[in-house]
Amino acid sequence: MAKVYTDNQDELTITNVIKNGIKQPGLPKWAVLRIALARSLRIETHPDEGLDRRESAVGGGEYSLEQLTGDGKPGDEDMTPPFCALLSQFHDLDLFSDHELFVKLLQRHVRRGLREIRSGWMETHDFHDYLLHELFGDLGASNTNDTDLNLRDKLIRALSEIGISADVTDAVDGPRLTRYLVKLRDANDYNPLLRGLDKLSFVLGLGEMGVFASPTKEPMIVALDIPRASLLWRSVPASKLIEWVSNAPEIFKLPIYLGQDVTGEAFGFDLAAAPHLLVGGTTGSGKSICLHAIIISLISKFTSNGLKLILIDPKRVEMAPYVNLPHVTDGVLTDVVDTIGVLNRLLDEMQQRETALANVGARDIDDPRAYRLSIPRIVVIVEELADLLMQSGGVEDPLIRLAQKARAAGIHLVLATQRPDANTFSGLLRSNVPSRIALTVQKGSESKIIIDESGAEKLLGRGDMLIKLLGKNTIRVHGVLLNSDDIANSVQLAQRKIK
Ligand SMILES: Nc1ncnc2c1ncn2[C@@H]1O[C@H](COP(=O)(O)OP(=O)(O)O)[C@@H](O)[C@H]1O
Ligand SMILES: [Mg+2]
């Protein structure tokens, strides 16, 4: 009989969901497997072959198709044909004629879904909210037909609903928001306006999306950033990244393009000055695409003589396109033991660099005396910090030591996580990774963990971010949208440049 096999970790996740998530101790385990399947089908890529688990493996669980799809049960209870149709469509295969492959793919999806739940859902969160967000999160806002003119009127009316009389003096369209310049008639309205932003967003029917306010240099004028209907959003194309990077300010050692600010101005920064970065946000918020923007900014500027990349991707999906780049010295690291090995090697490298720098009398890699050593910078990218930390306690220590000291040696960390909590981002790591990007999160408390202020819970998802770089004010940016062709093209160009 065909079965679907899980491993120990999967089993722990299943029990955890039943006990702490759905809180129905009698719920059969296969019900969680079905949820996991639905979760996996929300991801566009195919699940990894590494998720094939055999009967002979020790530990874990096994589920018959009868349990999982109702195979062989009478009438409506047998969900096998619709499941098979779903997977056939997803993989563009005829799985009705290959039952074995169907079961195999079913297992891969179920296990990937469990893994997503494991790294994406926190026990402290309501599981039903989590699912709602994960399964239906980006179905979009409903207010689609607003023209700018009736939005202006609507805004003035909404302001008066919350007791503020004001005029709109100007409006600028950015990629997703319109910035309205609003002239208050009474200065005493300013604080009530700031306090009333949630109410304003409610009156405007924006759902969870927030209205952000900022003072301007004009007397009595405040800027209100209001999201347009999602059909009216403009995405920021890859060409903007290429253009910005090739003209980036000279003083930037590692120029990175992220996207456009609220009014559509290009936003880039110097990763070397960051000098380490945390990127946090819920699933679907745009973390991976943000990491791609960072990597592509780097490889479109540097050959492997000037830059090395260490890519750590425990989920194995995102970093695969870069595996053959000469910048990527260790392949894509997916295994925690390998990762620890490479991190420890980086610590050695850091010490050797310190010695070499001291020998030429240089303080750090930016010191002119260090130039003749021509030491390449190293950027370490971690696609899911929580996943990695959960697999082994041995990862945190080398990461902290690198964060504390590696900057002078030209080594920089970019850590992404979908679980911005105190466990993942512990005190020491936190104080040594001073630059932060918050994509959309579920709660204000998570926003505070990432950028020390709330707000990211009111973002629009899909690459909408609040960026707080070392020593700078928080800025809101809409991320550049990179698809797999953009990534493949940039990789090809980078490879050609080397030859
Ligand atoms: N900058 C962006 N502009 C438009 N859509 C985006 C952007 N970033 C992400 N998205 C949308 O959100 C989806 C999830 O992005 P992804 O980077 O995979 O999120 P995460 O890694 O946080 O789960 C993407 O498939 C895309 O549809
Ligand atoms: Mg991702």
Image (cartoon, grey):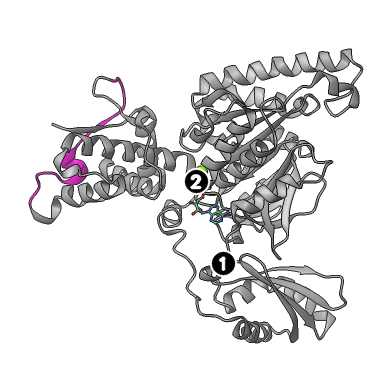
Q: In the picture, residue 435 is in which quadrant?
A: top right
From the viewer's perspective, tell me whether residue 338 is left or right of residue 405.
left
Q: Which residues are magenta?
A: 57-74
From the viewer's perspective, tell me whether residue 185 is left or right of residue 233.
right
User: Going from the N terminus, do you reach mark 2 or mark 1 first?
Assistant: 1
Q: Give residue 485's mark.
A: 2
Which residue does the numbered mark 1 point to in the structure image? 233
Q: Secondary structure at mark 1?
A: loop
- Give the residue type that dot 1 points to: Trp
Q: In the picture, residue 185 is in which quadrant?
A: bottom right
In the rendered image, the vertical position of residue 412 relative to residue 174, given as above or below: above
Q: Is mark 1 within 8 Å of ligand 1?
A: yes
In the rendered image, the vertical position of residue 254 relative to residue 440, given as above or below: above
Q: Position of residue 22 (x, y in %)?
A: 37, 49
Structural crowding at the residue carrying mark 1, measured as other residues with C-alpha within 10 Å and reported as few (<14), some (14–19) or many (≥20): some
Q: CA distance from mark 2 to mark 1?
A: 21 Å
Nearest the eye: 425 or 288: 288
Q: Is residue 303 visible?
A: yes
Report the quarter where the N terminus lies.
Answer: top left
From the viewer's perspective, tell me whether residue 191 is left or right of residue 495.
right
Q: Position of residue 324 (x, y in %)?
A: 53, 27
Q: Give residue 187's mark.
A: none
Q: Position of residue 434 (x, y in %)?
A: 75, 40
Q: Position of residue 406 (x, y in %)?
A: 75, 26
Q: Is residue 66 magenta?
A: yes
Nearest the eye: 300 or 366: 300
Report the quarter where the C terminus lies.
Answer: top right
Q: Is residue 39 magenta?
A: no
